[in-house]
Image (cartoon, rainbow, N blue to C red):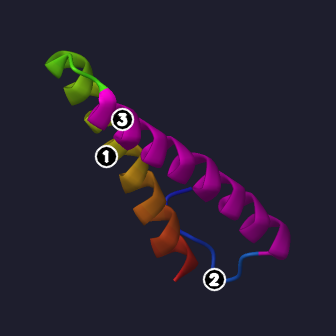
Amino acid sequence: MNKVPEMISTKDIAYIADIFEWNFIVCKKSHTFSEKVNDNDIKKELEKVSLLHKSICDELLKILE
């Protein structure tokens, strides 16, 4: 399904909120860890992870608009 339905149930909203929360936590933690790591390769990968989860959060927020 590529299109968001006109009406989203409260159960769907709760599920989307959970998905958002999981991704937001991973985004924050991976960014925090990237700042503490000395190895540049690991730092770069952690930043990629952070950006990936941030983009997922952004997409979820678009659905809820």
Q: Helix, strand or loop at disc 1?
A: helix
Kindly tell me whether residue 8 is visible in this rendering: yes
Q: Tags 3 and 1 in contact by the CB under 8 Å rule?
A: yes
User: Which of the pair 5/23 is nearer the observer?
Assistant: 23
- Label disc, if present, on residue 6 of the rendered structure: 2
Residue type at mark 2? Glu
Residue 59 lies in what quarter of the image? Answer: bottom left
User: Which of the pair 21/32 is nearer the observer?
Assistant: 32
- Say which residue appears at 82% left-offset and 75% top-offset: 10
Viewed as shown, does residue 35 lie left or right of 27?
A: left
Q: Earlier in the sequence, mark 2 or mark 3?
A: 2
Residue 7 lies in what quarter of the image? Answer: bottom right
Q: Tags 2 and 3 in contact by the CB under 8 Å rule?
A: no
Magenta stretch: includes residue 14: yes
Please determine whether, in this image, residue 40 is positioned above or below residue 22.
above
- Label disc, if present, on residue 51 of the rendered structure: 1
Q: Nearer the viewer, mark 1 or mark 2?
A: 1
Q: Which residue is mark 3?
A: 49
Q: Position of residue 12 (x, y in %)?
A: 76, 65
Which range of residues does the magenta coloring cover? 9-36
- Say which residue appears at 44% left-offset and 53% top-offset: 56
Q: Earlier in the sequence, mark 1 or mark 2?
A: 2
- Say which residue appears at 62% left-offset and 47% top-offset: 22
Q: Position of residue 9 (x, y in %)?
A: 80, 75
